[in-house]
Amino acid sequence: MHRSLFRSSETVIMFSRSPAFPPKPKPPFLCFHSSSSVPSSEQQPKQQPCTSTWSIVSPTRVQKLISARSDPLLAKEIFDFASNQPGFRHSYSSFLILILKLGRSKHFSLVDDLLIRLKSDRYPVTPSLFSHLIKIYAEANLPEKALKTFYKMLEFNIKPLPRHLNRILELLVSHRNFLMPAFDLFKNAHKHGVLPNTESYNILMGAFCLNGDLSIAYKLFNKMFERDVVPDVESYRILMQGLCRKSQVNKAVDLLEDMLNKGFVPDALSYTTLLNSLCRKKKLREAYKLLCRMKVKGCNPDIVHYNTVILGFCREGRAMDAVKVLEDMPSNGCLPNLVSYRTLVGGLCDQGMFDEAKKYMEEMLLKGFSPHFSVSHALIKGFCNVGKIDEATEILGEMLKYGEMPHTDTWVAIIPGICIDCDTERIGEILEEVMKVEIKGDTRIVEAGIRLEDYLIKKIRSRSTRP
């Protein structure tokens, strides 16, 4: 049974192991000052400070008190007061708990003071303390503090581990002006008994690639083999991305071949990088061949890979090749999505292949995908331009059926073709009337304007008079 009596900053808080006992054989006490707001001294009798004849509470009890405090500065007061008791020595756990509390609340100068004391009092320190500190400095975005932590470990005769090195490198390279300090740390790490691993190399290679220093990244990659460090899929991908950024896509493809020859299976992102770069460089044949090889080489193409190639073909006016890619997708276990159809329909319209585009627009709608207004507008305008008003109105009707609001430019394109007998002023009036219609899921094309209704009536009559 423990008791605590809280008073103002001038009062003394007394912790007792057994306050119910008579005062003769006094149990261990811990006395410390509190800054908490509590009843005034007028409301409570003033407690006398602990005398030197009282024995101090155990380090374990102090550790629990420090751990229980949510206010790190109050925890520090407890720590300091206990430190001033004759013959008292804190446990290492108390140091660790307090350092983490202070670090997470960004009282870094107090953390430094405690580290100095740990060293001067010759406490045995564990690597986990520095792991926590490096993480705290990373979250606080303090690269310089993290870098100093590496050398602080050496002061405590603790050999940093590769994971410590890598965490510091990640933080350093995220700041451009710390790239070279990171490189220096990397190069000198072996002098302190830390051998960089594959992740260490990848961190530096990625940083130099992003910085445009591809030659340094390549040297690091080659050093891996010299030092018996085995690269991984990420190592190759980092270099491929660096090469593609420099428009050296052929070298990136050669690197892929080297990777495959060494038994590595490239990941999806590696292929995405190469396919995108090949398409941008208009190497569509190579891109399509790479897409076909993926499954054979152990990586099934996903929707991103297919859409990248479809877009590449459509950009270069080869929409029918894009059609072939889309048609191949289901047999390879990948279904076209909204982006696939939008890209293909747009590409077909750009080439004037409106009937083919209409086919895929209808397929798109049947699968529940909503066409972007730019795609439907391109198709409707295309049909109007070649005099196929029936097809244009059919597409418009489908859009209204699915609750899609046509763009103003779409009405501007289709109404003149329908309102053949109207003058320009009357067409403007009809357009204004059409734009007032609220498009709902059950809206019909005849509700979108009087002249559109007249047009459909004429169509029905013309069909009924056919032999």
Image (cartoon, rainbow, N blue to C red):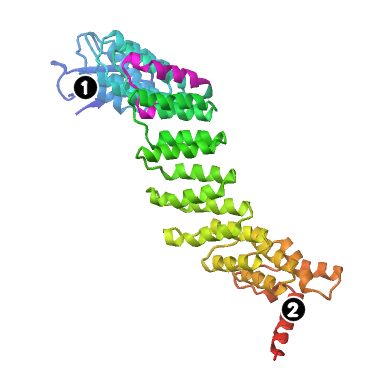
Left or right position of 288 against 40: right
For mark 2, what is the residue? Answer: 455
Q: In the image shown, does 336 or 249 lie closer to the viewer? A: 249
**In the rendered image of this protein, does residue 203 appear above or below residue 374?**
above
| 316 within the magenta span | no
Type of amino acid under label 2 = Tyr
Type of amino acid under label 1 = Thr
**In the rendered image of this protein, does residue 225 appear above or below residue 431?**
above
Query: Which quarter of the picture shows residue 219?
Result: top left
Q: In the image shown, does 169 or 148 lie closer to the viewer? A: 169
For mark 1, what is the residue? Answer: 60
Q: Magenta segment, principal secondary structure?
A: helix
Q: In the image shown, does 384 or 332 lie closer to the viewer? A: 332
| 178 within the magenta span | yes
Q: Quadrant of the N terminus?
A: top left
Q: Earlier in the sequence, mark 1 or mark 2?
A: 1
Left or right position of 16 against 290: left
The extreme bottom residue here reads 467
* Residue under the image location 37 percent in, 43 percent down: 265
* Residue under the image location 34 percent in, 17 percent down: 190
Give the percent coordinates (x, y) of residue 446. 69, 76
Q: Is residue 105 visible?
A: no
In three-dimensional space, the C-alpha distance between marks 1 and 2, rounded to whole angstroms, equals: 92 Å
**In the rendered image of this protein, does residue 429 appear above or below residue 275?**
below
Query: Which quarter of the picture shows residue 7?
Result: top left
Give the percent coordinates (x, y) of residue 232. 37, 35
Q: Quadrant of the C terminus?
A: bottom right
Give the percent coordinates (x, y) of residue 399. 63, 68
Magenta residue span:
177-200
